């Protein structure tokens, strides 16, 4: 039972952090579209606002109809989330899943360590996770193909 509680703590913390971030915002951010299944051509067509940067790439090994969430997080020395800098939700098609995750580079520079985290759910169960990817620069960059691994 203790192990099950420990595995839910990061998810609970991430959810609470997202809720607090949304509630604490001084001015509402413009809503970012989150297409259900973007194609590669759609990802190239949509222009990025001048004040934002983005991480892009594709996710491998995600089964069809799985729901995927990617989050760009500021983490402390112990790997605990401190702030959410951006997130997107996608629906997998069974093929490689392209993504574009916009973020504000001004908020990026306020933190020491930034990581990209991801998880995939299917039928309400966590099935896959993305091992944390360290993001070193606050600029637009392609991360290439990233493989999700089975969730513990």
Image: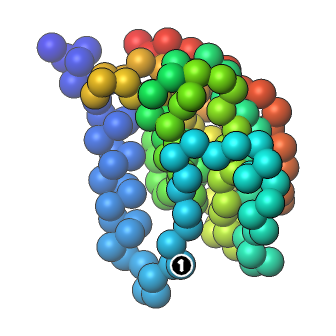
- Relative to 2, does residue 81 appear above or below in the rendering? below
Query: Is residue 76 something that shows in the picture?
Result: no
**Label 1 sits on residue:** 30
Numbered-mark total:
1
Q: Could you say where residue 111 lies in the image, as x and y percent from the top left?
A: 63, 59
- Please tell me which residue lies in front, 148 or 37: 37
Density class for disc 1 (Cα within 10 Å; few <14, some 14-19, many ≥20) is few
Relative placement, left or right, of 60 versus 78 is right
- Please tell me which residue lies in front, 87 or 1: 87
Q: Could you say where residue 77 lies in the image, as x and y percent from the top left?
A: 56, 41
Relative placement, left or right, of 28 versus 145 is left
Q: How is the image coloured?
A: rainbow
Name which residue lies at 22% across and 24% down: 5
Name the image quarter holding the N terminus. Answer: top left
Relative placement, left or right, of 69 versus 14 is right
Name the image quarter holding the C terminus. Answer: top left
């Amino acid at each position: 039972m203790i192990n099950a509680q420990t595995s839910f703590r990061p998810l609970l913390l991430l959810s609470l952090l997202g809720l607090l971030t949304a509630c604490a915002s001084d001015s509402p951010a413009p809503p970012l579209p989150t297409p259900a299944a973007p194609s590669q051509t759609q990802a190239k067509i949509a222009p990025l606002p001048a004040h934002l940067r983005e991480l892009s790439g594709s996710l491998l090994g995600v089964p069809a109809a799985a729901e995927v969430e990617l989050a760009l997080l500021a983490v402390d020395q112990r790997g605990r989330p401190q702030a959410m800098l951006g997130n997107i939700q996608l629906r997998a098609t069974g093929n490689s899943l392209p993504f574009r995750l916009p973020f504000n580079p001004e908020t990026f520079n306020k933190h020491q360590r930034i990581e990209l985290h991801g998880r995939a759910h299917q039928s309400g169960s966590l099935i896959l996770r993305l091992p944390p990817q360290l993001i070193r620069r606050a600029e637009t960059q392609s991360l290439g193909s990233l493989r999700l691994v089975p969730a513990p």
